[in-house]
Amino acid sequence: MTAYQALAADLRRRIVSGEFLPGDRLPVEPELCAGYGVSRSTVREALRLLTSQNLIRTVRGTAGGSFVAHPDPDHISAYLETSVDMMRPGIDQLTEIRELLEVPAAGLAALRRSGADLEALRGCIAGARGRAAGEVFAPNRDFHVVLLRAAGNPLLEIVARPVFEVLEGRFVRDRAPRAALDAIDREHRIVLRHVEAGDAEGAREATRRHLENLRTVYYPSVERPAPASRDPAPAG
């Protein structure tokens, strides 16, 4: 580990531990140089690294400096999405993660949902009904996002959204058969009824069945063909 990486790691530790809170200004460069016994260039490299990781932001001017950034769920999800996509997981792996997250979340949503959550879920269903295959994906995806949000744990949406985005990139949505879209609409309505009734077990079971149907019927019908192999043809 280089000197600037070691400095960045220690500042990161102090930020994560709460010693520096979101909005706090870090010590100025001369203080960091003296406190850590490093050069100004080392401090600047460490601060650039923390900025690239969205942990701090730099403000110019007399009242400026390096400030601890406020957590941004979009930044976190974007980073996770890139990482997940680079792993090239299969549809089965992605849907398995969805089941692990969304089935218990649906039960929590049935217990914790607000009136605004219910209205948002109903709006997603109304927005999808009768639309063409290429247009229906967004409201159907949003139904699941709202369901996770209704569970009352913001980490659920942050972790699950990258999975949705990676899945979305795998599909040619215009190919979705009408029967599959109609089944999704019916299943969303069943999930909604259980959530409206505060039936946690029913919401979990309805969500489990819905995700299983997505895995076996919908996803195979719209998945993009795998790219052709770049391996050279065997000689002979």
Image (tube, rainbow, N blue to C red):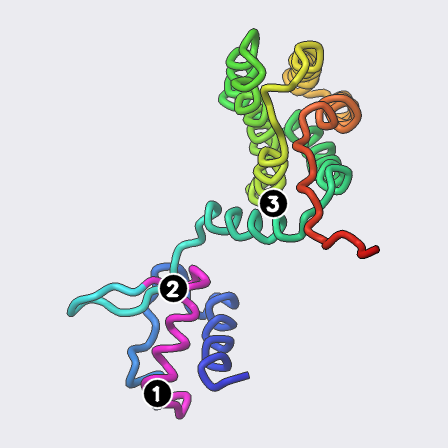
* Mark closest to the chain's N terminus, 1 or 2: 1
Residue on which disc 3 sits: 159
- For the residues labelled 1 and 2, the Cα–Cα distance comes to 18 Å
* Mark closest to the chain's N terminus, 3 or 1: 1
Picture layout, residue 214 above or below residue 227: above
Q: What is the crowding at mark 1: few (fewer than 14 residues within 10 Å), some, or many (at least 20)?
A: some
Residue 13's x, y, as percent?
A: 52, 72
Q: What is the crowding at mark 2: few (fewer than 14 residues within 10 Å), some, or many (at least 20)?
A: many
Furthest residue in direction front, as rendered = 236
Please identify the dominant SS of the magenta region: helix
What is the span of residues highlighted in magenta in the rendered image? 35-57
Which residue shows up at 59% across the image and 53% down it?
83
Front-most of 176 and 52?
A: 176
Residue on which disc 2 sits: 56
Kind of residue at disc 1? Cys
Residue on which disc 1 sits: 33
Which quadrant is the N terminus positioned in? bottom right
